[in-house]
Amino acid sequence: MSEDLSIFREIDEALKVDKLEKFFARHGKTILFVCLGIIIITIINVVNKEYDKKVAARQTAIILQANHLVRNLSIKKQSIKYYKPKTVWNH
């Protein structure tokens, strides 16, 4: 009786293997292309996000430099006393 069960198990496993082989024979390329597509889309997304971060960092640096320059100019303007020479007309 145990021999009968082991034969049924072997047949059952052989059927499962055959089903998997048929499934991958039909859909294997599709599954492969979908996985590759997901990987490529993920790579493009990561590269795009890194590029956006670099652009944002550059723009932030430019804005901070401009802000620093404007503050320095306003401090210099406040510290400079404007001298207006008297115009003398010789006629």
Image (cartoon, grey):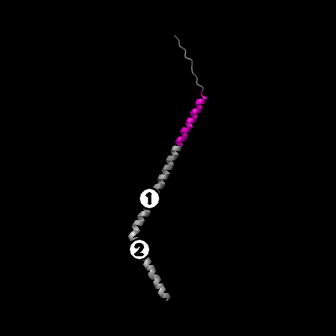
List the single residue furthest toward the bottom. 1
The prevailing secondary structure element of the residues shown in magenta is helix
- Find residue 11 and report its horizontal and vertical position in percent: 44, 82
Q: How many numbered callouts?
A: 2
Helix, strand or loop at label 2? It is: helix
User: What residue is at 42 percent from the left and 65 percent from the top?
Assistant: 32
| Residue type at numbered disc 1 | Ile
Residue bearing mark 1: 40
Specify the label residue 21 is tagged with. Answer: 2
Task: Write down the region rendered in magenta.
Answer: 61-80
| Residue type at numbered disc 2 | Glu
Left or right for 83, reference 52: right
> In terms of sequence position, does the residue under pointer 1 or pointer 2 come before the other?
2
In which image quadrant can residue 82 be found?
A: top right
Helix, strand or loop at label 1? It is: helix
Is 81 within the magenta? no
User: What residue is at 40 percent from the left and 68 percent from the top?
Assistant: 28
The reply to whether dot 1 and dot 2 touch (C-beta < 8 Å) is no
Estimate how packed mark 2 is, as few (under 14), some (14 to 19) or many (20 or more) residues with alpha carbons within 10 Å: few
In which image quadrant can residue 86 be found?
A: top right
- Find residue 39 and report its horizontal and vertical position in percent: 45, 60
User: What residue is at 42 percent from the left and 75 percent from the top?
Assistant: 19
User: Does residue 14 lie above or below 56 as drawn?
Assistant: below
